[in-house]
Amino acid sequence: LLDLNRTSIFHSPRGSLDLHSMLLDEYQERLFVGGRDLLYSLSLERISDGYREIHWPSTALKIEDCIMKGKDASECANFVRVLHHYNRTHLLTCGTGAFDPLCAFIRVGYHLEEPIFHLESHRSERGRGRCPFDSSSPFVSTLIGGELFAGLYGDYWGRDAALTRSPGRLGHVRTEPDDERLLREPKFVGAHLVPDNEDRADDKVYFFFSERAQEAERGAQALFARVGRLCVNDAGGQRILVNKWTTFLKARLVCSVPGVNGIDTYFDDLEDVFLLHTRDQKNPVIFGLFNTTSTIFRGHAICVYHMSSIRAAFNGPYAHREGPEYHWSLYEGKVPYPRPGSCPSKVNGGRYGTTKDYPDDAVRFARSHPLMYQPIKPAHKKPILVKTDGKYNLKQIAVDRVEAQDGQYDVLFIGTDAGIVLKVITIYNQETESMEEVILEELQIFKDPVPIVSMEISSKRQQLFVGSPAAVAQLRFHQCHLYGSACADCCLARDPYCAWDGVACSRFLPTGTGAQAKRRFRRQDVRHGNAAQQCVGQQFAGDALDKTEEHLAYGIENNSTLLECTPRSLQARVIWFVQKGREARREEVQTDDRVLQVDLGLLFLRVRRSDAGTYICQAVEHGFVHTVRRLVLDVVDERSVRDVFRGD
Ligand SMILES: *[C@@H]1O[C@H](CO)[C@@H](O)[C@H](O)[C@H]1NC(C)=O
Ligand SMILES: *[C@@H]1O[C@H](CO)[C@@H](O)[C@H](O)[C@H]1NC(C)=O
Ligand SMILES: *[C@@H]1O[C@H](CO)[C@@H](O)[C@H](O)[C@H]1NC(C)=O
Ligand SMILES: *[C@@H]1O[C@H](CO)[C@@H](O)[C@H](O)[C@H]1NC(C)=O
Ligand SMILES: *[C@@H]1O[C@H](CO)[C@@H](O)[C@H](O)[C@H]1NC(C)=O
């Protein structure tokens, strides 16, 4: 990818980075990243060039104090975990500050076309409640109207899990401490503002996390994925729940596949969440990446949720429990007014200007009923993608929506723990109610098998920014010519970004005005990959059998030999044929424990003289067959090889 100029990689000039946060700024064309004692501003044009650095270590006194308290020296540093746009000229940043969090502003922008990146350290303030003490504890945050909403373990010991809003106009508000009904060993994954309507007073912030489930029948240790929700303008209660959320509700996020005997397999461990924004701000599409929690069955799944299903769960019945010893069940009694979870807004009647005016019975009910009864089911009631081959651990997801000739596709970019990004589309078949997954590319971003810990996507620039602990890479979404120089290869790749233009495989853009004439030459069929139909009359592989160049291969008698053949399309199935002698019939190669068909080609463990012949490697995909390679295998004995090298 580096040689192809498809990626560019930024390594910290100081050797180590220890990436903990990333912020994309398409407007200023910068990518901001935070690591251990370091912050960088990188150019989106080419992230390896023209960086700006801020060195932001903890003071010697603080580090000494941290070590004195028994922490390991490696943890007594300033890990930057918060990076948000604060206003037009400043970013807000917070770091763990050697187990004493602090926050500060960074001046950004341009001066005479040179990027500005300057920490206003003289104005730094304490960061407790806004940033964790620990560099590795689960943490999410989002900045709304100058106020920081965070899901964090906010104390020194990392035990006090909370959803908080930092000091601001409405004061510091949080979840009640030590209330296991609200949060129980949560792993925070995402925090996002999603408006419900035009009334800003009705805006809600959604938290995505996993936690130990109270209501699980499988035992108290079961993990469930959750969406939690609160009103942005929640000011807490007046007599009860003072400075505590009065509008917090949560519901279970379900991602499961039906199994035999009606026992479903659940993916409950939420790893990442991505909000795909559409023109309708109120209705982003939500992609969740899940892991199983089973020790027997390992795997990952991606489920898609619509805001309508999420809202339906929050508008539905509450779960209820008589007391700590009871099960959670459906609440069928009277629900107080205003309905718990609703915001003090005009849309809700305008009777209350602040949650402080909510009647005691409504607040009391909210406190004891944080859980919704109905779980949230994904679109089509099943995952769009399930991976159980154990090849990679999936860690991060980002999505780009693309217009292709035959419709709209969501291209998934999935970051693994092995330095690889998978580029995948999934196609839903209405008739069979099944999902077909098409792996378009497996992109090795980092040479080493490092985990991908952060991803940012820019549809505008058609680029993905990928963070590993040690480096940050940028990747272009597509490189169409890699699919080969034939119409069939291009078509079979089924990449919605690419189409055959009559000459080459190139970037496909839905035609606007004036391009009608050109349009006829665009060949693309993402849904079916029907190359036979698309490529009629094109430089077509139907007669390519004779055109495919022959390659020579030698095998040493009784030794192993590999005939290489890897089709460009990852979907293709490979079939090998052999022709022994010019006049002989072409026959399918029979594999056994001596002749194996492997990913890289055809492997002879002990090649015989009788194996000599012409081998034809064909790729079959969607009923379309085309020849990838022709190899003429010659088998020689070891002595003659030795003679050749001796030069006799
Ligand atoms: C690589 O890509 C960058 C930006 O996309 C471009 O400026 C540069 O000229 C390219 N280099 C080569 C060798 O093509
Ligand atoms: C942005 O916020 C910073 C920090 O409070 C402040 O110093 C600066 O003046 C603000 N800039 C604008 C344009 O409001
Ligand atoms: C998924 O779960 C398995 C088993 O619990 C674990 O080994 C693996 O690390 C998890 N994957 C990720 C990406 O955390
Ligand atoms: C196969 O070839 C390798 C390399 O030339 C040689 O070391 C090995 O002994 C050979 N094995 C057999 C079984 O002839
Ligand atoms: C290859 O192996 C066969 C059977 O073991 C043997 O008869 C033959 O002589 C071997 N050929 C060479 C060149 O080693």
Image: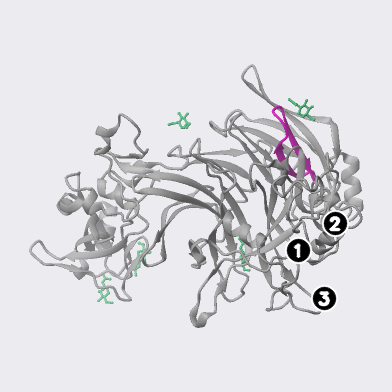
In terms of image quarters, where does ligand 5 lie?
bottom left
Residue type, numbered disc 2: Pro
Residue range (magenta): 78-97
Residue 488 x, y percent position in the rendering: 26, 49
Q: What is the crowding at mark 3: few (fewer than 14 residues within 10 Å), some, or many (at least 20)?
A: few
Residues 5 and 131: in front is: 131
Residue 83 x, y percent position in the rendering: 71, 40
In the drawing, what numbered circle is on residue 359?
Answer: 2
Q: Mark 1 points at which residue?
A: 370
Farthest-out residue, top: 112
SS label for mark 1 = loop
Q: Can residue 139 be seen in this view?
A: no
Whether the residues at callouts 3 and 2 have beta carbons within 8 Å, the answer is no
**Quarter of the view holding residue 213:** bottom right
In the drawing, what numbered circle is on residue 324?
Answer: 3
Confirm whether the magenta stretch covers residue 80: yes
Marks 3 and 2, how far apart at CA: 25 Å
Please give the name of the residue rendered at 70% of the width and 39% of the height, measured from the top-left corner.
84
Among numbered discs 2 and 1, the one appearing first in the sequence: 2
Q: Can residue 497 be seen in this view?
A: yes
Viewed as shown, does residue 402 lie left or right of 28? Answer: left
Please give the name of the residue rendered at 34% of the width and 36% of the height, measured from the top-left corner.
511
Residue 503 x, y percent position in the rendering: 25, 37
Please give the name of the residue rendered at 69% of the width and 75% of the height, measured from the top-left corner.
216
